[in-house]
Amino acid sequence: MIGNSLPAAASAMAEVFGEPDSGAEIADELLRLVTEVVTAKAEAMPGARELVELTAAAVPVAVASNSPRTLLEAALVRGGLSAMFPVKLAADEVAAPKPDPVMYLTACALLNVEPADALALEDSMTGLRSARAAGVSVIGVPTPKDQDFPADVVIGSLRDEDLLTWVRGWPRR
């Protein structure tokens, strides 16, 4: 379920558990439980803060998440990243979640950046499909690590020294 929207994850769980409803009750419970855990225990991916700081000093940045707004905000606050993103886009704020391209297209529009000039960091196949469908190049940091991940570039960590060196070489705004 990595990368799936809350409704898609709840629907899959309803099917697995043989629940007759559409997964709405499961979605509500899942959102409550995940938000509770994220608020108390989540950690930003290693290297996330440094990479976002370096990148934001050079180019416009956004976060485009398949999580609902409440969960996105909880994760960003817990990870110390909330103030770093001038544009934050959640799945419940667009017409269709990832893998539909609308989230990336909307984020690019809000940043006043053409999709062909944008770069996505993605950890899921769902996100990769969304970015590609929007015409955005992708650096992959796949979860789980052992999967075949057809991004333009695949790195093992946000602390990847080649990535950080590349970003440090960008002219600053």
Image (cartoon, rainbow, N blue to C red):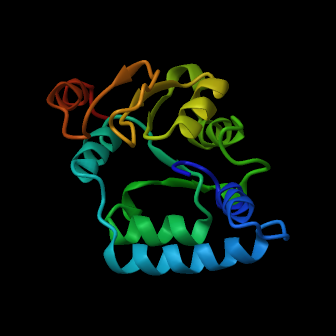
Residue 108 in percent (x, y) is at: 60, 36
Residue 71 in percent (x, y) is at: 53, 69
At 42% from the left edge and 25% from the top edge, which residue is drawn? 148
Is 5 placed above or below 172 here? Answer: below
Rendering quarter of residue 167: top left
Q: 45 left or right of 64? A: left
Residue 119 in percent (x, y) is at: 46, 28
At 39% from the left edge and 37% from the top edge, which residue is drawn? 142
At 29% from the left edge and 53% from the top edge, which residue is drawn? 45
Q: 164 left or right of 119? A: left
Quarter placement of the C terminus: top left
Q: 54 left or right of 1? A: left
> Foreground: 81 or 131?
131
Number of numbered callouts drawn: 0
Residue 46 in percent (x, y) is at: 22, 51
At 41% from the left edge and 64% from the top edge, which residue is drawn? 76
> Foreground: 164 or 99?
99
